[in-house]
Image (spheres, grey):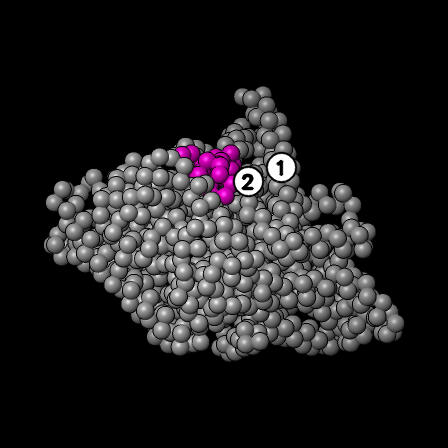
């Protein structure tokens, strides 16, 4: 029997790479502690949405949470800087940043908010898709209406690109594109496929404007109850699970891409990102205000 | 004792009336801003980004204020079949017990509502840029009001001065789901 | 032990007459304290449970309903229905059902419908020699049509309780055929009873009058097209359409009918505040209760139990229907949707039943419970309007219950009744 049960929340359903990642971590921890420590995953938002479950983890109600960096923006300010549009050149670049000293530095900023980060998972890259035309340049976006999440940075990013941001609930996007209320939306390949949006918005542009990592964090209260040995087991298992999760994510991304292309979606890959990056100047001016943030952006860009 | 209850009664009557008017104004204001958003999006081709978070905050306010009024006016729907078959004295005793349970919960709502407010004050609500604690303010206010209202009922019951509100067809009308 | 605290405290409080909202909150509070978790979480769930944009459709639809009843939209619809079909045997009973069907297309509240249609029809029926029990039973059962036809805020509550991933547009569409089927079954039952009791007919007022009443009720009925057309085509979200319904009801009653005074408006607003804050407080408290049910794996436990009883979806559905009918006898609709959806939805999904189909089953089932004592709010309103006791009405309610249960069984075992229309609309 488990001496300690750690409860972990996820908003994604069972079988999703993030859920499978934490489950793999659970299996390793259970094995290495001889069954003393069990991690139980609650998928599908059973315990609440990301912001709520982050709060619950901070208050020590539950022990672990898997959430997007985007949901930490208003709690740990550094996550906003690291989620700025067009900050990373590629997924590989993002991994190098997170797995290096900058990743450690970001992790350190969570502690004062009652959270101990254990692993960075992949959330993929978000891209634009629409029902009107293939988008290759910034000009192609002019005047188009895109659904974005309720977040200041996203809204400002759209205006900087000359498009209109339209926040609306995710469930309304399909019919809104169908009826022309909006022209498109933005997301990663797996969501583009599973939401059925590929059916109504067949022009997909691989511009990778946002790469927002996913975080697995443990509550400081629960963490301090573990022995240093068990903490080490948890850290190792989390790191190993990140490797698995990133592999699962890449597989899922590939499978979704093949599926939407087979279903008739047109994927534009030859985008010149330079003009998009240049258009972000006002956004960076607005959100990168402190010397520390400027330094962080510079070091991220310089990471090879 | 009785004079104290009467004073609390007067205060509560005033607070309940004000809460009901504020909640009603909140509902009307919520209607107007959501309609403005629809209008802007479909007619003016532009989005009002602040409408959704403000409307949610307004809804939270009018629900907690309205629910507190519900405690004052005893319109929250319950299952009182057992009370119907019991003699009045036993029924009164059970209602007192029920009031006591609600009092504990209302105090919890005020205390933990306050804690939640304090603990989330350092965060920021998206788009409207207010401290996160504002989200829990209605919970706290509702808890304080409910505490006062149910305390009045309990004291009246203890002193034997509580007269049950007349239940008529219009009261039942409210118990719609 | 924690299960005993959660469900035991809930049951005990309910028996001593504590309002349902507080039964949910207090039992969650007690369980969290017993488990040694920070009690903060109960109040966080309470606050988060009501801070959902989609929920806003509930106050709006209720507000619109209050405005329509007070502003005379409902009255004009009844007059139109009366001129149209009053001349068949037991005509006023048929008028009652037809008016309920039309008004049900713009209101989602069965109690508002019983009060609005019953308030106009029951006195007329008594005056023309109909039995008061008959008038009450026709009114209270026909009021359930409002739950099935769009708009139905109970379907929104179901969608949210199911995790917010069930399409509201599909649920709205799925209720249409079952709602019309219910109208048909009640109409037939009412006709048979009327013939056996020898109830009178009304003179036909002539096509000119029918046409005039149609024109008068048209501005109100246009709302059917606005709400359903808007939500179905994706032009509006359910929340937006509910807000438009409020504005539209105000415009029609103030500018077209000129029947809404400031006093009426204030009264309708305060009434809507009372109703919605009561319903939404239950939703918030159920958020805390539901969090504990997830934390304690209640859904998995019930799924395992159901599986041990039978692995036949036919039997499972019958079992769930019986459980819901029994619960619906004692409890009101929205708290039951909120409490039982997280338990039953994973169960039926595991048996391959469509969530939209199950939503229709649940709404109809719990709707019948609104007409069963000891807690039957729709029946109470109708009986109060007719000034008879529930027990008097109960004497002759059985054929109407039978009609309702027959439709429930059809809807349960013929999924196409619910699922054909949404599929058709999605294909357009
Ligand atoms: Na309806
Ligand atoms: Na009932």
Which residue is more in the foreground, C408 or A157? A157
* Residue at disc 1, secondary structure: helix
Around disc 2, counting alpha carbons within 10 Å, would you say few (fewer than 14), some (14 to 19), or many (20 or more)?
many
| Residue at horizontal 33 percent and vertical 71 percent from the top | A255
- What label does residue C409 carry, if any? none
Q: Position of residue C427 (x, y in %)?
A: 54, 76
Q: Position of residue C246 (x, y in %)?
A: 67, 53
Span colored in magenta:
B120-143
Quadrant (top left, top right, bottom left, bottom right) of the N terminus of chain B: top right
Ligand 1 lies under 8 Å from the Cβ of mark 1: no
User: What residue sits 88% from the left and 72% below the top?
Assistant: C208
Q: Compared to C135, does A212 lie above or below?
A: above
Is residue C424 shown above or below C80?
A: below
Locate the C terminus of chain B and report the quarter of the image it occupies: bottom right
Residue drawn at x 31%, y 67% as measured from the top left: A252
**Residue A82 seen in the current view:** yes
Q: Residue at x 75, y 58 (%)?
A: C73
* SS for callout 2: helix
Q: Disc 1, disc 2: CB below 8 Å? A: yes
> Where residue B173 sits in the image (x, y, percent)?
64, 51
* Residue B22, numbered label: 1
């Amino acid at each position: 029997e488990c001496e300690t049960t750690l409860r972990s929340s996820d908003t994604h359903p069972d079988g999703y790479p993030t859920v499978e990642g934490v489950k793999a971590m659970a299996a390793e921890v259970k094995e290495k502690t001889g069954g003393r420590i069990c991690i139980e995953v609650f998928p599908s938002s059973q315990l609440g949405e990301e912001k709520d479950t982050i709060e619950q983890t901070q208050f020590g109600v539950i022990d672990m949470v898997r959430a997007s960096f985007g949901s930490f923006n208003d709690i740990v300010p550094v996550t906003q800087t690291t989620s700025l549009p067009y900050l990373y050149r590629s997924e590989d670049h993002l991994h190098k940043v997170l797995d290096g000293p900058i990743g450690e530095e970001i992790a350190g900023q969570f502690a004062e908010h009652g959270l101990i980060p254990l692993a960075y998972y992949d959330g993929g890259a978000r891209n634009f898709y629409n029902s009107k035309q293939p988008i290759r340049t910034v000009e192609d976006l002019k005047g188009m209406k895109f659904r974005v999440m309720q977040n200041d940075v996203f809204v400002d990013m759209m205006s900087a690109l000359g498009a209109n941001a339209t926040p609306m609930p995710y469930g309304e996007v399909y019919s809104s594109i169908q009826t022309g209320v909006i022209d498109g939306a933005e997301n990663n390949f797996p969501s583009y496929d599973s939401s059925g949006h590929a059916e109504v918005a067949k022009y997909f542009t691989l511009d990778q404007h946002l790469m927002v990592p996913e975080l697995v964090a443990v509550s400081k209260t629960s963490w301090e109850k573990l022995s240093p040995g068990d903490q080490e087991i948890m850290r190792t298992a989390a790191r190993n699970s990140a490797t698995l999760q990133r592999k699962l994510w890449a597989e899922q991304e590939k499978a979704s891409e093949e599926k939407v292309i087979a279903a008739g979606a047109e994927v534009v890959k030859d985008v010149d990102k330079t003009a998009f990056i240049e258009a972000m100047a006002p956004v960076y001016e607005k959100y990168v205000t402190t010397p520390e943030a400027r330094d962080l952006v510079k070091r991220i860009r310089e990471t090879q | 004792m009785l004079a104290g209850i009467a004073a609390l009664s007067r205060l509560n009557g005033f607070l309940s009336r004000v809460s009901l008017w504020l909640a009603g104004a909140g509902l009307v204001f919520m209607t107007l801003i959501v309609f403005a958003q629809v209008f802007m999006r479909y007619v003016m081709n532009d989005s009002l980004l602040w409408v959704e978070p403000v409307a949610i905050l307004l809804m939270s306010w009018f629900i907690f204020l309205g629910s507190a009024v519900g405690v004052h006016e005893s319109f929250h729907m319950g299952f009182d079949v057992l009370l119907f078959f019991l003699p009045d004295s036993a029924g009164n005793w059970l209602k007192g017990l029920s009031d006591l349970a609600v009092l504990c919960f209302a105090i919890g709502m005020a205390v933990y509502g306050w804690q939640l407010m304090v603990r989330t004050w350092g965060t920021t609500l998206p788009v409207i840029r207010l401290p996160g604690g504002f989200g829990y303010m209605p919970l706290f206010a509702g808890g304080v009001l409910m505490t006062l209202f149910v305390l009045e009922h309990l004291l009246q019951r203890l002193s034997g001065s509580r007269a049950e509100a007349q239940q008529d067809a219009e009261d039942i009308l409210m118990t719609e789901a | 032990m924690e299960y005993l605290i959660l469900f035991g405290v809930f049951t005990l409080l309910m028996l001593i007459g504590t309002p349902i909202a507080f039964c949910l909150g207090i039992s969650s509070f007690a369980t969290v304290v017993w488990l040694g978790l920070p009690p903060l979480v109960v109040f966080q769930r309470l606050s988060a449970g009501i801070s959902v944009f989609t929920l806003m459709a509930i106050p709006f639809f209720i507000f619109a309903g209050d405005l329509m009843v007070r502003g005379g939209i409902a009255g004009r619809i009844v007059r139109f229905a009366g001129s149209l079909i009053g001349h068949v045997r037991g005509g006023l009973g048929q008028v009652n059902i037809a008016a309920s069907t039309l008004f049900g297309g713009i209101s989602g509240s069965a109690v508002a419908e019983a009060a609005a249609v019953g308030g106009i029809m029951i006195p007329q029926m008594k005056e023309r020699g109909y039995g008061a029990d008959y008038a009450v039973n026709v009114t209270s059962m026909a009021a359930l049509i409002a739950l099935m036809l769009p708009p139905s805020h109970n379907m929104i509550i179901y969608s949210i309780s199911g995790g917010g991933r069930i399409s509201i547009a599909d649920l709205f569409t799925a209720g249409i055929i079952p709602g019309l089927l219910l109208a048909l079954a009640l109409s037939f039952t009412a006709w048979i009873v009327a013939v056996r009791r020898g109830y009178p007919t009304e003179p036909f007022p002539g096509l000119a009058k029918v046409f005039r009443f149609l024109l008068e009720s048209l501005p109100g009925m246009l709302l059917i097209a606005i709400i359903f057309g808007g939500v179905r085509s994706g032009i509006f979200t359910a929340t937006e359409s509910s807000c438009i319904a409020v504005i539209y009801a105000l415009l029609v009653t103030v500018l077209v009918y000129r029947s809404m005074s400031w006093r009426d408006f204030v009264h309708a607003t305060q009434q809507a505040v009372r109703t919605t804050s009561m319903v939404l407080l239950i939703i918030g408290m159920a958020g805390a209760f539901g969090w504990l049910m997830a934390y304690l794996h209640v859904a998995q436990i019930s799924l395992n139990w159901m599986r041990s009883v039978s692995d036949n979806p036919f039997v499972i559905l019958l079992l769930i229907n019986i459980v819901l009918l029994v619960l619906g006898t004692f409890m009101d609709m929205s708290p039951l949707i909120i409490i039982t959806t997280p338990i039953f939805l994973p169960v039926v999904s595991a048996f391959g039943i469509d969530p939209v189909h199950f939503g229709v089953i649940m709404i109809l089932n719990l709707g019948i419970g609104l007409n069963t004592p000891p807690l039957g709010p729709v029946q109470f309103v109708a009986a109060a309007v007719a000034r008879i006791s529930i027990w008097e009405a109960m004497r002759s309610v059985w054929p109407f219950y039978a009609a309702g249960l027959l439709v429930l069984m059809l809807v349960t075992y013929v999924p196409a009744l619910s699922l054909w229309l949404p599929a058709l609309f999605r294909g357009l």
